[in-house]
Image (spheres, rainbow, N blue to C red):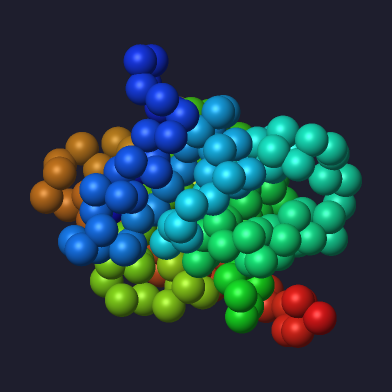
């Protein structure tokens, strides 16, 4: 189950918690990507752990009430959530630097190739879509993070196919397809899978051992 986006006007900040409670006995796998007061409540006043909680660095700094000046501070913020049982898996978007994924046992950093950003609209939704699809299929966290990174990368360079057309990457077998090639819904997944296979070899996933020590 995925809860993505800000809480609608008229709903309380504890709405994500109410959704989690309503799902008890059905599934514990609630993936949340929200913002503002609802996110602040989930981080500062956790009731029970979510399956996955995602947010970007600006939202993390708002919750931490201080700047997270470097990667180590961002990692520290995420690992602090382990003892407070905020979520089993915590993911922080780092903008152009990629994404961090932290559990009680591991930490991964995902970095995609650098290209000019055409549009960031929907970037978080694209990431959550890729990550959730991979988890639902039974992929491990490493591959799920890679899927999220590829979907976010494609989203950011996808409005205006010309921005992507003609670009090639080391290790990629052909040009990255644009949204125009996904006009037929029946071929959408096949096209996304093709993109994933082309970019997975150049989407860097770094693992940091013993990071909680």
57 left or right, relative to 27: right
Q: Who's the residue at 15% across and 44% down the image?
A: 185
Of residues 119 and 66, the one drawn nearer to the viewer in this rendering: 66
Q: Is 137 situated left or right of 129 in this image?
A: left
Q: Which of 36 and 11 is in front in this view?
A: 11
Residue 164 placement (x, y as % from top left): 50, 41
Q: Residue furthest left?
A: 186
Quick check: can you spot residue 4? no
How many numbered markers are drawn? 0
Q: Residue at image x 57%, y 62%?
A: 85
Q: Could you say which is closer to the camera, residue 212 or residue 111?
A: 212
Identify the residue at the far right of this view: 69
Quick check: 10 above or below 180?
A: above
Q: Where is residue 70 in the image (x, y as percent from the top left)?
A: 86, 52
Q: In this view, does 137 lie above or below 35?
A: below
- Residue 19 located left or right of residue 104: left
Q: Locate residue 197, reporting x and y percent.
A: 40, 69
Image quadrant in which the C terminus is located: bottom right
Image height of 141 relative to 111, above or below: below
Q: In which quarter of the image is residue 179?
A: top left
Whether residue 31 is situated above or below residue 118 in the rendered picture: below
Q: Which residue appears at 48% of the width and 73% of the height?
A: 141
The residue at the point 72 percent across, 51 percent down is: 97
| Residue furthest top in the image | 9
Q: Where is residue 134 in the image (x, y as percent from the top left)?
A: 35, 66
Indicate left or right for 160 with 35 as reference: left
Query: In front here: 163 or 112?
Result: 112
Question: Can residue 212 be seen in the rendering of this structure?
Answer: yes
């Amino acid at each position: 189950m995925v809860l993505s986006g800000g809480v609608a006007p008229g709903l309380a900040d504890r709405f994500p918690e109410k959704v989690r409670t309503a799902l008890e006995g059905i599934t514990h796998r609630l993936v949340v990507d929200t913002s503002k007061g609802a996110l602040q409540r989930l981080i500062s006043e956790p009731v029970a752990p979510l399956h996955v909680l995602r947010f970007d660095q600006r939202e993390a700094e708002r919750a931490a009430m201080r700047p997270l000046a470097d990667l180590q501070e961002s990692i520290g913020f995420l690992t602090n959530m382990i003892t407070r049982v905020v979520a089993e898996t915590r993911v922080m978007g780092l903008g152009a630097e990629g994404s961090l994924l932290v559990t009680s046992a591991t930490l991964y950093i995902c970095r995609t190739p650098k290209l000019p950003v055409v549009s960031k609209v929907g970037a978080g939704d694209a990431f959550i879509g890729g990550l959730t699809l991979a988890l639902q299929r039974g992929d491990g966290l490493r591959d799920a993070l890679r899927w999220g990174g590829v979907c976010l990368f494609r989203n950011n360079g996808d409005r205006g196919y010309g921005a992507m057309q003609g670009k090639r990457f080391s290790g990629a077998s052909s040009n990255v397809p644009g949204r125009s090639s996904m006009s037929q819904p029946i071929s959408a997944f096949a096209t996304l899978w093709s993109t994933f296979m082309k970019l997975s070899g150049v989407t860097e996933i770094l693992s940091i051992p013993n990071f909680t020590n």
